[in-house]
Image (cartoon, grey):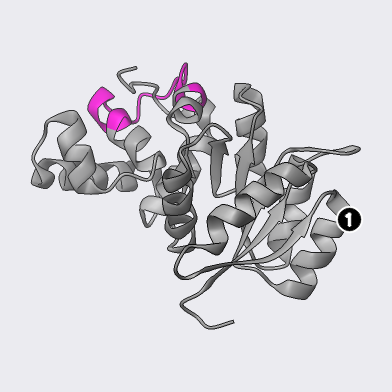
Amino acid sequence: MTADVIAVLLVDDHPVVRRGLRALLDVQDGIVVAGEAGDGPTALSLAASLRPDIVLLDLRLPGIDGSALIEPLRAAGPRVLVLTSATEPAVAARAVRAGAVGVLYKDIDPDALVRAIRAVRDGHVLLAPEAVGSLLRGSRTEALTPRESEVLARIAEGRSNREIARLLRLSEKTVKAHVSSVLGKLGVQDRTQAAVYAVRHQGDVNGGTGR
């Protein structure tokens, strides 16, 4: 597999869902479906043998909570992007704590899913807006200002500085300043680490998301 091609392993117990995902991804430039699995053991075996870049993982698999697969899947090398119909906040939280770099819901627009796969391959953390709101809501720390919390929530959604500036009606320069402040206060080195911190420590992150 060449470096510029994203190899994806599909893990879902419904053959129709896997067929639909394969049909979507097979026509995308630079993305190839490396394999398919309908259960946990097969997923782990294929992740080890195929070495995909991304595992697109459903959390509702026969006999196992899909979140329990995330850590061993990551040990094989791929990034794990969850695509699930389970919208309970606790589900997203467990997945991210286990090491998923994204949590998306199955009603996502197909084009948005393709963009998400590319973004995750490029190192971004990507969460459905509903998941971000649930994960950040009700947190208690006073380390971040309400505006910084809004910026952090948008970072966790995978937004660029330009997008954050547009959404919050700020200048890009102001957003960059907020991002720098957020990184400093959280003690992390980059945006990806900040996003992971936000969702893994939702009890310690100010919930000023403006939602």
- Residue 200 in view in this figure: no
Residue at the (75%, 65%) spot, across then down: 47
Q: Quadrant of residue 90?
A: top right
Residue position for label 1: 41
Please state, as top left, top right, bottom left or bottom right, where the C terminus lies in the image: top left
Pick out the residue farthest to the bottom. 2
**Residue at position x 25%, y 45% in the image:** 179
Residue 182 vertical placement versus 134 (above, below):
below
Locate the N terminus and report the quarter of the image it occupies: bottom right
Q: Is residue 169 left or right of residue 88?
A: left
Give me the residue at 85% from left, 49% from top.
39
Q: Is residue 83 magenta?
A: no
**Position of residue 170 in the picture relative to residue 21 (left or right):** left
Position of residue 9 in the picture relative to residue 145 (left or right): right
| Disc 1 crowd, CA 10 A, few/some/many (<14, 14-19, 20+) | few
Q: Is residue 146 above or below residue 152?
A: above
Relative image position of residue 173 (x, y in whole percent): 9, 47
> What range of the chain is rendered magenta?
134-150
> As displayed, is residue 189 above or below residue 88?
below
Amino acid type of disc 1?
A: Pro
Which is more toward the observer, 164 or 137?
164
Element on which disc 1 rests: helix
At x 31% / y 44%, what residue is drawn? 159
